[in-house]
Amino acid sequence: MGYAEEPIAWERAADGEFPYRAARDGVELRLRVNDFPAEPLYTLFVDYRPAADLDDWPAPWLRPAPTADQLRAGSEARRSRGIVDAIVVAGWAHRLCTAPPGPASAVLEALGAGPELAVTEQGGVVTSVAVGCLPPPADLEALLGPGLTAAPAAAPFVCEVVLGQGGLALVRRAAEGRPTTPSSART
């Protein structure tokens, strides 16, 4: 069985050309991103030697979740083109964790969104944001993990994506042990 057929948990590397690395049975694995479509999308390196070209991410492999900064940048770019998909929703979930407690207008501004989102407040604190689209749940899970939860370090809130009929809600609650006063929230 080749590496592409094995479950491998990849981690991010601080290298733009080789953004993923893993270890398997004492062997160092690295994944290079190529000049696609002129070349295969990825080349797998085993102990620093090219071992296989791949045109897609193998199904058994576990890709590391994107960072909050990567989601923010990706969601802003897609939103500016009028796209609302799993990347945008995951970006909103992360931003909602660090957005001010309220009022609704301040939260929508922090999300980079407008009146297309329905905001629920309790006692002046935004508790949820309704999104009128439903990206594929598997795409959301790939970005946020199986619990569909965003919980950036030091953020005053935790945000869970709750799927519904024809849409979803971003439900926000205070993170344990973290203050949620307006002075503690970041935008």
Image (cartoon, grey):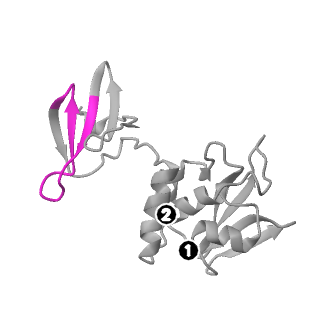
Q: Quadrant of the C terminus?
A: bottom right
- Residue 52 vs 122, above or below: the answer is above
Q: Are marks 2 and 1 in contact (CB under 8 Å)?
A: no
Residue extending furthest toward the bottom: 115
Q: Is residue 74 above or below residue 117?
A: above
Q: Is residue 123 left or right of residue 164?
A: right
Report the disc number at residue 69: none
In the rendering, at what x and y percent does residue 94 appear? 59, 55
Q: Is residue 30 magenta?
A: yes
**Which label is found at residue 133?**
1
Q: Which quadrant of the rendered structure holds the N terminus?
A: top left
Q: Find residue 121 and report its horizontal and vertical position in percent.
A: 80, 69
Q: Amino acid at mark 2?
A: Ala
- In the picture as drawn, the residue positioned furthest to the right comes out as 123
Residue type, label 1? Cys
Which x, y percent locates residue 145?
54, 48
Q: Nearer the viewer, residue 162 or 81?
A: 81
The residue located at (47%, 46%) in the rendering is 65
Horizontal relation, residue 78 to residue 19: left or right:
right
Please give the name of the residue rendered at 70% of the width and 74% of the height, measured from the top-left corner: 105
Q: Nearer the viewer, residue 67 or 186?
A: 186
**Residue 86, numbered circle:** 2
Whichever of callouts 2 and 1 sits on the residue coming sooner in the sequence is 2
Q: Position of residue 144 (x, y in %)?
A: 54, 51
Query: Callout 1: few (<14), some (14-19), or many (20+) C-alpha neighbours within 10 Å?
Result: some
Q: Range of the magenta residues? A: 29-49
Q: Nearer the viewer, residue 70 or 145?
A: 70
Q: Secondary structure at mark 2?
A: helix
Q: For the residue labelled by badge 1, is the local secondary structure a helix, a strand or a loop?
A: loop
Task: Give the quadrant of residue 130.
Answer: bottom right
Question: Which residue sits at x=49%, y=72%?
Answer: 84
Mark 2 nearby-residue class (10 Å; few <14, some 14–19, many ≥20): many
